[in-house]
């Protein structure tokens, strides 16, 4: 039974007052999920900038053939660390940061289930990142075998640098941090939901994070095992992955983690999009249960497709993995149609978050389509390990996840800070990023089709790859300008942005039912929760009767009148 | 509004056509490569269809249902999900994917087919950073390094089987014009067969990242008439001590 007013206990009220410590010590010692969320997001964004800077250097190197701004060894370190940092120290922690901040708010909880574990997890992630980046400061340099570190190349014989050991150990620790984080999030979602917040009233972002956490829980331990064995091979005379053992076993273990990982950094951003689309269409989500089912299905399928990364090894069942990979397109397509149907007959408001979300849809469509090409082994034989894959992967990870991330940051920044990001700058940034992204990555499809392999620090001028490479490098400059614009917007809006109020967008979910930023324990009162969109219900149904029962038909009556295709 | 919508749909259509036109594979020069190219073309047609329909739907929705900005704007009708739509968009992608899977498996069998008695067997060994080619029956060996890459000749109209292995780390034996590659993995043998149809010079390159000089682990194949090839092989044999 929900009540309109839930008076805060005195103990909590004192805690709120005590928590006025905004100094450095306050941030370093915090166990507040909101502060840890912000620490995660800011740290992840710094790693995004560092890894992005590496990619700018690489694009400069490839702009003109036989340029050699860098020696090949440095180039190899850069693309290895670019991929590693983007996957493990940007995308994954950005997901955990968003989840940290938003999950307790969306389910009406005062904090995560284990606040101290949460703080420990954050610091473990920071140390693991520093260990990996420490590779740049050892004599022989950072790891230089690609972000998936295939043996035998990654064994001591071929990669003797201490930087490679730091890479192995750092990733192992970051994996432990991710596992602990996912346990915390799962416990929070299962145990701390507010009265009335049933599983089928969870906001879709929370559902996506729930499935993501399960993926982390099952996939990161496998990565941990692979890295531990690699470390033993490297340092204690093991031969699991050397020629005496079987190098292919590592590939299986790595991609058994690696493909779910793709969804670990895609599903949460699908969740972000699924939050933003209904709010800016001013309508409920079209087919809530279909979205939940599709999310679970994508998560489940993601464990059965790993060997499509290994078609060219000639050692996997190509037919089986082709079919499972094709199947994953179905629930993904269903989400896409659900987004469009939500916008259909809505009243669309193109504020910056919505702009990013529509941009994301267009980019994700291209990334999804090229994914179906790659799922077909004969086509994969032709374009595997070429720039076609680089293009596909960036349409999915950048065009989809990063665009949705910017949408989410514009959407929730007012909640995080109490101030709006500048809308005009945001729109300019969007168009710069949209054009820059496509100019950079679209030509890579053709480069890959023309046979340009990925991970080459140089190419011969007569191969015919010159023009498109120059074009791609030009586009990368636009991306850099767009990101700088965001930094400027972020920095100035923190203190000078327009005051946001509690709910600047007309949000649907509980995080908009508290102040911006929320008080230490999040809520002083909760609205009645009878659907996945309690705040929209309030606006649609008008005032609430004494005792908290909303006017008009209850959710169950409405659901009963539905045709079973999910709630409206 | 509808004028704008039609202009948008025309632009989308033209964009998709440009996409199809630009997304062409290199000219395939082998029998197996031609199968892959025609499969790719079918995928491209399906992709263009999906792209046009979905982007068109998205663009039309954006133009048609634009509302006023601001959080207090009037709410539209709060419509709910319709079962029929859900059924359609679970079914249509499933059917499309099933068709693509069937097409794929057909071509996959062609590409992975191995001749029982190939006309020519070439052992290919990858190493840091070069390739060594051994013509099995004649014992002719051609090898190369990053500084001096290998160039070999092969006959057209004869089935050639490549037996691929590695001496150190994982490499990948890749010839863009053949539209195929196979990894060269230590402790494991790999194979693919081709029937080259067009004479010409085709460059090849290591596909899987393999360390410092990966970008320079290249080689070249000259596809010539069977007669010329036999002469070349005999010359090589004579030159071998």
Image (cartoon, coloured by chain):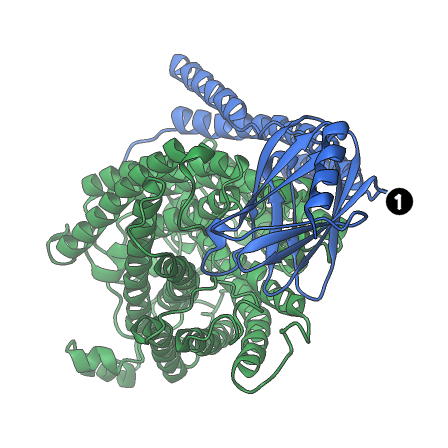
Q: Quadrant of the C terminus of chain A?
A: top right
Is A419 or A299 nearer to us in this picture? A299
Asked which quadrant contains residue B46, the reply is top right
Look at the image and give the colour of chain B. Answer: blue
Above or below — where is A215 with respect to A419? below
Is A234 or A366 nearer to us in this picture? A234
Indicate left or right for B232 with B144 as reference. right
The percent coordinates of residue A565 (x first, y second) are 64, 44
Indicate left or right for A365 with A90 as reference. right
Look at the image and give the colour of chain A. Answer: green
Q: Residue furthest top?
A: B3
Asked which quadrant contains residue B31, the reply is top right
Asked which quadrant contains residue B158, the reply is top right
The residue under the point 52% across, 84% down is A235
The residue under the point 20% across, 51% down is A420
| Chain under callout 1 | B
Indicate left or right for A35 with B232 as reference. left
Q: Which residue lies furthest to the left in this view?
A: A496
Estimate how packed mark 1 is, as few (under 14), some (14 to 19) or many (20 or more) residues with alpha carbons within 10 Å: few
The percent coordinates of residue A385 (x first, y second) are 55, 49
Residue B228 shows up from this direction? yes
The percent coordinates of residue A459 (x first, y second) are 42, 43
Question: Element type at marker 1?
Answer: loop
Above or below — where is A273 with respect to A141? above
Is A345 or A472 nearer to us in this picture? A472
The percent coordinates of residue A378 (x first, y second) are 69, 41
Question: What residue did someone put label 1 on?
Answer: B116
Above or below — where is A56 with respect to B52? below
């Amino acid at each position: 039974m929900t009540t309109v007013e839930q008076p805060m206990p005195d103990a909590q009220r004192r805690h709120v007052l005590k928590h006025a410590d905004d100094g450095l010590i306050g941030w370093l010692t915090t166990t507040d999920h909101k502060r840890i969320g912000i620490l995660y997001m800011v740290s992840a964004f710094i790693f995004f900038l560092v890894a992005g800077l590496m990619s700018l250097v690489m694009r400069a190197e490839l702009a003109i053939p036989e340029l050699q701004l860098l020696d090949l060894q440095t180039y190899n370190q850069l693309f290895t660390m670019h991929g590693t940092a983007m996957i493990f120290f940007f995308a994954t922690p950005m997901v955990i940061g968003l989840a940290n901040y938003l999950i307790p708010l969306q389910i009406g909880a005062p904090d995560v289930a284990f606040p101290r574990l949460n703080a420990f997890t954050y610091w473990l992630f920071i140390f693991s990142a520093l260990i990996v980046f420490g590779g740049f400061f050892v004599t022989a340099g950072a790891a230089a075998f690609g972000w998936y570190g295939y043996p035998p190349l990654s064994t001591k014989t071929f990669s003797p640098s201490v930087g490679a050991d730091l890479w192995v150990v750092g990733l192992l620790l970051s994996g432990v941090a991710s596992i602990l984080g996912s346990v915390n999030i799962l416990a929070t979602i299962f145990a701390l939901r507010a009265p009335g917040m049933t599983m089928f009233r969870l906001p879709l972002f929370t559902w996506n994070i729930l499935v993501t956490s399960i993926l982390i829980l099952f996939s990161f331990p496998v990565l941990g095992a692979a890295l531990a064995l690699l470390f033993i091979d490297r340092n204690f005379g093991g031969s699991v992955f050397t020629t005496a053992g079987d190098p292919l076993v590592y590939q299986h273990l790595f991609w058994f983690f690696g493909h779910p990982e793709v969804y670990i950094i895609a599903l949460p951003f699908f969740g972000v999009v699924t939050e933003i689309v209904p709010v800016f269409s001013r309508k409920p989500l079209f087919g809530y249960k279909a979205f939940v089912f599709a999310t679970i299905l994508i998560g489940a399928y993601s464990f059965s497709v790993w060997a499509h990364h290994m078609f060219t090894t000639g050692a996997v069942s190509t037919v089986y993995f082709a079919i499972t990979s094709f199947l994953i397109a179905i629930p993904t397509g269903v989400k896409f149609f659900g987004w469009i149907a939500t916008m259909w007959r809505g009243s669309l408001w193109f504020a910056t978050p919505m702009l990013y979300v529509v941009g994301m849809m267009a980019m994700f469509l291209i990334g999804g389509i090229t994914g179906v090409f790659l799922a077909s082994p004969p086509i994969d034989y032709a374009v595997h390990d070429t720039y076609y894959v680089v293009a596909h992967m960036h349409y999915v990870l950048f065009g989809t996840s990063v665009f949705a991330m910017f949408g989410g940051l514009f959407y929730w920044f007012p909640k995080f800070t109490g101030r709006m990001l500048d809308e005009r700058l945001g729109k300019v940034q969007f168009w710069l990023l949209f054009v820059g992204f496509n100019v950079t990555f679209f030509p890579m499809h053709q480069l890959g089709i023309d046979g340009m392999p990925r991970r080459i620090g140089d190419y011969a001028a007569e191969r015919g790859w010159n023009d498109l490479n120059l074009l791609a490098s030009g586009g990368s400059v636009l991306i850099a300008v767009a990101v700088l614009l965001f930094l400027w917007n972020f920095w100035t809006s923190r203190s000078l942005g327009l005051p946001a109020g509690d709910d600047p967008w007309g949000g649907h979910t509980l995080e908009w039912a508290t102040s911006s930023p929320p008080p230490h324990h999040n809520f002083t009162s909760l609205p009645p929760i009878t659907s996945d969109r309690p705040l929209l219900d309030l606006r649609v149904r008008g005032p609430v009767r004494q005792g908290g029962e909303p006017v008009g038909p209850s959710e169950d009556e409405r659901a009963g009148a539905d045709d079973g295709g999910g709630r409206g | 509004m509808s004028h704008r919508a039609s202009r948008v749909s025309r632009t989308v259509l033209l964009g998709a056509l440009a996409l199809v036109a630009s997304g062409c594979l290199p000219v395939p020069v082998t029998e197996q490569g031609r199968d892959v190219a025609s499969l790719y073309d079918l995928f491209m047609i399906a992709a263009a269809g999906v792209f046009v329909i979905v982007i068109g739907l998205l663009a039309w929705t954006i133009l048609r249902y634009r509302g006023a900005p601001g959080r207090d704007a009037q709410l539209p009708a709060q419509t709910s999900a319709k079962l029929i739509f859900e059924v359609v968009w679970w079914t249509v992608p499933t059917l499309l994917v099933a068709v693509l899977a069937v097409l794929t498996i057909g071509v996959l069998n062609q590409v992975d087919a191995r001749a029982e008695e190939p006309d020519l067997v070439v052992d290919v060994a990858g190493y840091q950073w070069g390739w060594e080619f051994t013509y099995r029956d004649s014992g002719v060996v051609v090898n190369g390094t990053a500084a001096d890459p290998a160039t070999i000749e092969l006959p057209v109209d004869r089935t050639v089987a490549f037996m691929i292995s590695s001496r150190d780390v994982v490499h990948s034996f890749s010839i863009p014009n053949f539209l195929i590659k196979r990894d060269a993995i230590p402790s494991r043998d790999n194979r693919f067969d081709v029937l080259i149809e067009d004479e010409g010079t085709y460059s090849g390159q290591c596909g899987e990242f393999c360390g410092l000089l990966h970008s320079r682990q290249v080689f070249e194949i000259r596809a010539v008439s069977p007669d010329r090839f036999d002469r070349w092989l005999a010359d090589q044999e004579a030159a071998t001590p």
